[in-house]
Each structure stands twice: as structure tokens, then as C-alpha cells.
Image (cartoon, grey):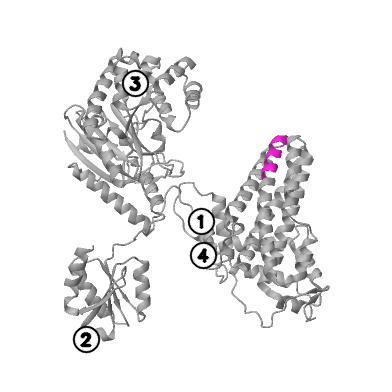
């Protein structure tokens, strides 16, 4: 076992070095192929959707290529630069890094488990194969560009191919299945050796593409381009030198210093080059150290980033967000609510004990002035605190603002995000506010035009009745509700396991709960079956459940008359884990292609306000999961033109007269026309800007227009252009914008 562990340690060191050298080779290939680097524009979005190692690889490549005039982040250029062998580098190399780190972690703690070591080694083997295949594709691409015919023959003698990689992996898998871990490590070492050779050849071929045949002629002592009987396609004109990246240029100079001898044939030059990249050579450590220094000391390493679980929003995203907030606000105000704002943080005692098991996600702040505070977790508890603090007995309000949760970021889930809340507090007709907030949620989702959705609805008293009927102790109601609430993401068997093994229910009790929480269907139809005794007859014998069914009967009739019940599903598995719910609970789910989870939720909370004051004020509300809704809207907008601004008119002044632009654009601003200005001598620069920014109208003023007291008015969409008197500009634009805003 000790020999196996030592072999794994050597593999760990070698593969770690390979992951660094491979980055340098790939960077040289990017320049050799004039690759499009847009695939390397990865950033941490804050939701965990992009691997940390993928981002690290992308950053390393960009550090090495910083300042390069060959490889750029552009969508223009030859299609050959956008091949998978380049675009997949972040993921493939990121996976290798993860596999290397995983093996390293196991080596540190494992001393006698061949199975654990074998699993990590085999995982590394698969990732090495992927790296080798991508690198091999780039080698062939470089060979096609280098212009040295006999170089291809030297490479072919190495017998490096995808088949050799696959055969090596096949042998390793067979050894793993036989649990022959010593053989497994030896087979993976062979794969690692093949990949080392491929990566070295990638560096060789990329270097020759970048340096050209002039370098080979110089090293051959000017022998007319003949190398060991091979021929060089010598270029008549000297190749123009181009600017390499700051990191790759250092590597290229190191290689040139290594190959400084003259009068050598091509095979000798290649041999010396490959030796330089051999981990067993005396010079390799110097190369590895230099590459690491470039990656670790470069100023690009100090680029700022957003905290985990947060993100910035670009102008296109802000356009969609502003539109969504405007639509939501319009719906809220249609229902006669007033706006409310509360502090971003509350006293910790205000928030604790209100969210059940999720209370652990509250963001606590350091004590800065004798008070323990926390960032607000939602907008409902601050609203309840406000109502109680001000002695209000009725209040209909909406609130759109940020909240914070110390959650694990994932796709569509952040630590900082907006909520859009609508709440009604006070005594009203029975089930009236409940009907209105469900109707508002439906109105908002319809107005946002996101696509198909459903609103699952249940009653907390009905759920509590189910738990009591099934024999759950009252002290465990809330924690069991928290488990049931996971049924939209997990199977009942998984939830059952949690209820039994972690929360102490008997198997019989858990199974009985299962018979109830699987009941769901159209509201009026399902309610009729329950009330008629054909479904869940035990519920009618339980007082709290019977009361809840009566509430739902009133609510469903109102939703039916309001013509929005077709989006509602009566679902007894809906639990809503928050402790403060006391009556109707509901949750909206998107049914389209984008998987985002819940997009809105709410319910009745009659006792929450009373926690902060002397009187109980019943309340019901809804909250829109706006970040998830925006994810859907952004996905839909990908193939649509999105205007980042609402600019209606571009004032284009030809020349350098800022005062002319200031006078004209100010006249437009004064009458509330959305306008901006540009001062440039070339009219096409103005037109291109208007087209790119999707500005519908242009006012063009040059020297001639100034002298004659006129302006040119151009419609960007139709390209029609007309001359109008300068004095009529404002009126003409107002008329056109009124007809075609």
C-alpha cells in the first residue's frame, strides 16, 4: 500500500505541473490560431452556476495573453478560431484542476484505502484524456499553419493519437474493475505520459507558427531552409512581427534562449524543445517556476469581484428590470396600495423566531453601537413591525426592495435579491384579502408575459389537521411542514426518509402523511370530492380542517367568478416552511423551459403583527420572486433587440462645436424629449452610434446647416432624411414622436 501511495504522490506532482504547463501551451495556441477569447470571459455570477476552477483557467489564459494583438475577445474574424478545442478549454482544464485537487486531498488523509485512491486516480484519467484530445486537435491545427513540411513527419513518429489515449483509458478502467490498484496507477501514468507529450507538442507547433520559418533559418545557419532532408516553405517577404501577450512573450523568449545554438537540424531543435518541457529535465523546474510567477504576480490577479451570491447588472439587464418593476408597480397601484420603505437592517430580535428552520440564514451584522442587528430576511416581518409600531389597524401597502439571505448560491438563488411584496392588514370581509392577493399574483405574472405558470394553494389549518390525524405530535408540526415543503424538489421517499431518520416519526405515520400530501387537482373539483366524502373523509371529522375547507370554498368561488381559477391548483403537499403562516398559503411555479423553482408565494399570517404590539391585526400578503422571473425574461430576451436607453433623438454635430450641441439638446430636454448628443466630424460615426443604440431619430448639424439656419432630420429605421428650418425643430420632433413614440 505504501508503494501505491508513493506512486499516487508522484502522479499528483506530475499532473499538477501538467495543468500549469498545459495552460501556457494553450495560450500559445490561442495566439497561433488568432483565437476568439470570448469563451474565456467567465466571471463569478454569484449563483454558483460557473465553476471556480473554470473561472480560474479563464483568468490564467487572459493573464498570459494580456496585451496580445493576435488573440482577442471579438466575434469578428475567421470561423476557425471558434472551434470547440478553444471554447472548451475553461471547462476541460478546470475539470483537470478539480481532479488533481481531489486526488491531492485524498492522498493527505488516506493511508490504506486503495479503493479511495483508485477512484480519484481513475477520475483524473478521464479528465486527462479530455485534455489530451483537445490539445491534440490544436497540435494538428498548428501543424497546418506552421509551413514546415518535415515537422509533421517528426510528429507522426511519436504515434500520438486519440486512439492511444482511449486504449490507455480502457486499460485503466479494466484494472479499476479488477480492483488491481497498482496496475491502475501504472496505466494512468502511461496516459499521463501521453498527454505530457501532446501538450509539449502543442507548445512546439504553436511556437513555430508564431516565430515562423525565419527563426528556423536563423538556427540552421542559413542553409536555405533544409532540415534533415525536409523542406521549408520559405516566405519571400520577412514576416511582420506582431505583439504577443505579456505572459506568452516571456515564455517565447525563454524558449528562444533554450534553442540559442545555431547550425542544428530541425529534429535536433525539436528534441531540445521537447526536453525543455520534460518534467525530468534539469531546466523544467525553471520553466514551471516562471509560468507560475507570471500567473501569480500579474496585476490582473487583483481585479475586484463581487461578494459570493451577489452580482452586477449590465445596462441591458437593467432595461429589463426597470420594465418589470414598472409593470409590477402599475398592478399594485391598480389595487389602491400605498408604497412603504423600511430600513435595510432590523434589530436581530425583530427577525429571530419568525422563519422556522430558515432562521439560520439571517445575515447578522457586527455590533457597531450597542444594538444587535441583522439584514432583513424578507419584507413581511418589517411590514408587521411597522404596522404594530404605528398602531395601525388597517393598511394596504406594497414594497419593492432588496433582502438578504445567507444561503448557498445556486442557479437562480442569490444572497442579495429583490422582493416585490403586496400585503393587506386589517379586518375585512371573510377571505376577501386572500382572494385579492392571489388575484394580484396572477395579474402580475400575466402582465409580465413570462409564459405558462400555476399557483399551488393550500391552507395551513388543513395541513395541521392532516398532521394531527396522522398522529404527528403538535411540537413537531412546524419541522414536519418544513420537510413536506421539499416535495416540489424531492421524491416522497426522500422526504419520508428525512421525517423518519432525522425527525423521529414512525414509518406508519410518515406513510399516512403520504396518502394526504399526494392529493392535488383542480380546486372546485377536488374540494367537491373532499366535501362529498369521496376524498379525505377524515378531514371533515376534524374541526380545524373542516373550518379550513369552508374558507377554501369561499375563496375558490371568488377566484372562479374573478376568472383566474384556471391557474390555481389545490395541492395538499404545499406547506410553506415559514412559521408565521396561519391560514391560506400559495406558491406560483413557472411551467416553461427555464428551471427556476418558485416564482412567487404568500399566505395569511394573523398572529405576526401581534408579536410586535398589544393587539392582533390579521394580515395576508404575497411576494414575487422577482430575480427568478427576471431570469425567465432575460432568457426570452436573448434573441430580441433590447434597448439599454430610451433615447428618442440623437443630436449629431459635425465638427467640434460643443456649444452648438449644448444649445440644441437643451431645447429638447426642456420639453421632456429624451435626447443625447455627439460631437464628431464624421457623419457615419453618428449614424453607426444611432443604429447600434437603436435611437429612432437623428438631428444632423454641420457647417452648411449652421450657415443656412436649417437642420437635417433623419429617420434611422426608414433612412429618410429631410431638411427643416432650425426654428421648427422642437415642434417637428414633438409631432413625429407623438405619432410614432
Question: Residue at image x 43%, y 27%?
Answer: 483
- Quarter of the picture holding the C terminus: bottom left
User: Which label lies toward us, 2 or 3?
Assistant: 2
| Cβ atoms under marks 3 and 4 closer than 8 Å | no
Question: Residue at image x 64%, y 46%?
Answer: 99
Q: Which residue is mark 1?
A: 42
Is 281 located above or below residue 236 in the figure? above
Q: Which residue is mark 4?
A: 73
Q: CA distance from mark 1 to mark 2?
A: 53 Å
Q: Which residue is mark 2?
A: 708
Dot 4 crowding, Cα within 10 Å, few <14, some 14–19, many 20+: few
Residue 367 horizontal/vertical position (percent):
36, 43
Dot 1 crowding, Cα within 10 Å, few <14, some 14–19, many 20+: some
Mark before the other along the chain sequence, 2 or 3 = 3
Q: Specify the segment rendered in magenta.
A: 111-123
Mark before the other along the chain sequence, 1 or 3 = 1
Q: Judging from the image, what secondary structure is the residue with disc 2 in?
A: helix
Task: Give 360 or 501, whichever is nearer the viewer.
Answer: 501
Dot 3 crowding, Cα within 10 Å, few <14, some 14–19, many 20+: many
Task: Give 583 or 567, whichever is nearer the viewer.
Answer: 567
Amino acid at each position: 500500500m505504501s508503494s501505491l501511495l508513493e506512486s499516487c504522490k508522484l502522479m499528483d506532482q506530475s499532473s499538477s505541473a501538467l495543468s500549469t504547463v498545459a495552460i501556457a501551451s494553450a495560450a500559445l495556441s490561442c495566439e497561433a490560431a488568432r483565437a476568439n477569447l470570448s469563451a474565456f470571459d467567465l466571471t463569478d455570477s454569484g449563483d454558483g452556476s460557473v465553476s471556480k476552477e473554470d473561472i480560474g483557467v479563464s483568468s490564467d489564459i487572459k493573464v498570459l495573453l494580456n496585451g496580445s494583438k493576435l488573440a482577442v475577445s471579438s466575434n469578428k474574424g475567421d470561423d476557425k478560431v471558434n472551434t470547440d478545442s478553444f471554447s472548451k478549454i475553461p471547462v476541460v482544464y478546470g475539470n483537470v484542476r478539480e481532479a488533481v485537487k481531489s486526488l491531492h486531498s485524498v492522498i493527505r488523509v488516506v493511508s490504506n484505502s486503495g479503493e479511495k485512491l483508485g477512484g480519484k486516480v481513475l477520475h483524473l484519467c478521464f479528465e486527462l484524456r479530455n485534455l489530451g484530445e483537445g490539445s491534440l486537435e490544436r497540435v494538428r491545427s498548428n501543424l497546418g499553419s506552421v509551413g514546415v513540411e518535415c515537422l509533421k513527419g517528426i510528429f507522426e513518429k511519436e504515434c500520438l493519437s486519440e486512439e492511444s489515449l482511449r486504449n490507455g483509458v480502457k486499460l485503466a478502467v479494466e484494472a479499476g474493475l479488477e480492483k488491481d490498484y497498482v496496475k491502475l496507477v501504472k496505466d494512468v501514468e502511461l496516459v499521463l505520459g501521453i498527454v505530457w507529450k501532446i501538450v509539449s507538442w502543442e507548445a512546439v507547433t504553436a511556437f513555430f507558427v508564431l516565430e515562423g520559418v525565419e527563426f528556423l533559418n536563423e538556427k540552421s545557419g542559413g542553409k536555405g531552409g533544409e532540415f534533415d532532408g525536409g523542406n521549408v516553405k520559405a516566405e519571400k517577404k520577412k514576416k511582420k512581427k506582431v505583439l504577443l501577450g505579456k505572459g506568452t512573450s516571456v515564455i517565447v523568449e525563454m524558449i528562444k534562449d533554450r534553442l540559442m545554438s545555431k547550425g542544428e537540424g530541425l529534429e535536433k531543435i525539436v528534441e531540445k524543445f521537447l526536453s525543455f518541457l520534460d518534467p525530468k529535465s534539469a531546466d523544467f523546474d525553471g520553466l514551471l517556476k516562471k509560468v507560475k510567477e507570471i500567473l501569480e504576480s500579474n496585476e490582473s490577479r487583483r481585479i475586484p469581484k463581487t461578494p459570493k451570491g451577489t452580482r452586477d447588472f449590465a445596462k441591458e439587464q437593467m432595461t429589463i428590470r426597470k420594465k418589470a418593476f414598472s409593470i409590477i408597480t402599475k398592478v399594485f397601484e391598480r389595487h389602491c396600495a400605498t408604497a412603504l420603505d423600511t430600513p435595510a437592517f432590523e434589530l436581530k430580535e425583530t427577525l429571530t423566531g419568525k422563519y422556522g428552520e430558515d432562521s439560520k440564514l439571517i445575515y447578522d451584522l457586527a455590533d457597531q453601537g450597542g444594538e444587535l442587528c441583522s439584514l432583513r430576511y424578507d419584507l413581511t416581518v418589517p411590514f408587521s413591525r411597522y404596522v404594530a409600531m404605528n398602531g395601525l389597524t388597517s393598511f394596504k401597502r406594497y414594497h419593492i426592495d432588496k433582502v438578504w439571505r445567507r444561503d448557498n448560491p445556486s442557479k437562480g438563488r442569490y444572497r442579495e435579491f429583490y422582493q416585490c411584496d403586496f400585503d393587506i392588514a386589517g379586518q375585512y370581509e371573510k377571505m376577501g384579502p386572500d382572494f385579492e392577493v392571489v388575484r394580484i399574483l396572477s395579474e402580475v405574472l400575466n402582465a409580465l408575459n413570462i409564459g405558462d405558470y400555476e399557483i399551488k394553494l393550500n391552507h395551513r389549518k388543513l395541513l395541521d389537521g392532516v398532521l394531527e390525524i396522522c398522529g404527528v405530535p403538535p411540537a413537531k408540526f412546524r419541522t414536519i411542514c418544513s420537510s413536506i415543503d421539499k416535495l416540489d424538489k424531492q421524491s416522497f421517499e426522500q422526504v419520508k426518509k428525512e421525517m423518519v431518520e432525522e425527525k423521529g416519526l414512525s414509518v406508519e405515520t410518515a406513510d399516512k402523511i403520504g396518502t394526504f400530501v399526494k392529493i392535488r387537482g383542480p380546486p372546485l373539483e377536488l374540494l367537491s370530492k373532499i366535501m362529498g366524502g369521496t376524498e379525505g373523509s377524515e378531514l371533515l371529522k376534524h374541526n380545524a380542517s373542516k373550518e379550513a375547507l369552508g374558507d377554501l370554498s369561499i375563496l375558490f368561488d371568488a377566484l372562479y367568478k374573478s376568472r383566474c381559477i384556471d391557474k390555481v391548483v389545490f395541492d395538499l403537499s404545499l406547506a410553506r416552511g415559514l412559521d408565521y403562516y396561519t391560514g391560506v398559503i400559495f406558491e406560483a411555479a413557472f411551467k416553461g423551459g427555464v428551471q427556476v423553482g418558485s416564482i412567487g408565494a404568500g399566505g395569511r399570517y394573523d398572529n405576526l403583527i401581534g408579536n410586535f404590539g398589544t393587539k392582533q391585526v390579521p394580515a395576508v400578503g404575497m411576494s414575487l420572486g422577482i430575480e427568478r422571473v427576471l431570469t425567465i425574461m432575460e432568457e426570452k430576451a436573448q434573441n430580441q433587440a433590447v434597448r439599454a436607453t430610451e433615447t428618442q433623438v440623437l443630436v449629431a454635430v459635425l465638427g467640434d462645436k460643443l456649444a452648438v450641441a449644448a444649445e440644441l439638446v437643451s431645447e429638447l430636454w426642456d420639453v421632456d424629449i429624451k435626447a443625447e448628443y455627439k460631437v464628431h466630424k464624421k457623419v457615419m460615426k453618428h449614424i453607426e452610434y444611432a443604429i447600434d443604440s437603436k435611437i429612432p431619430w437623428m438631428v444632423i448639424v454641420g457647417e452648411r446647416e449652421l450657415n443656412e439656419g436649417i437642420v437635417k432630420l433623419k429617420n434611422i429605421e426608414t433612412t429618410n432624411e429631410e431638411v427643416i428650418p432650425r426654428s421648427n425643430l422642437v415642434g417637428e420632433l414633438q409631432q413625429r414622436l407623438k405619432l410614432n413614440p
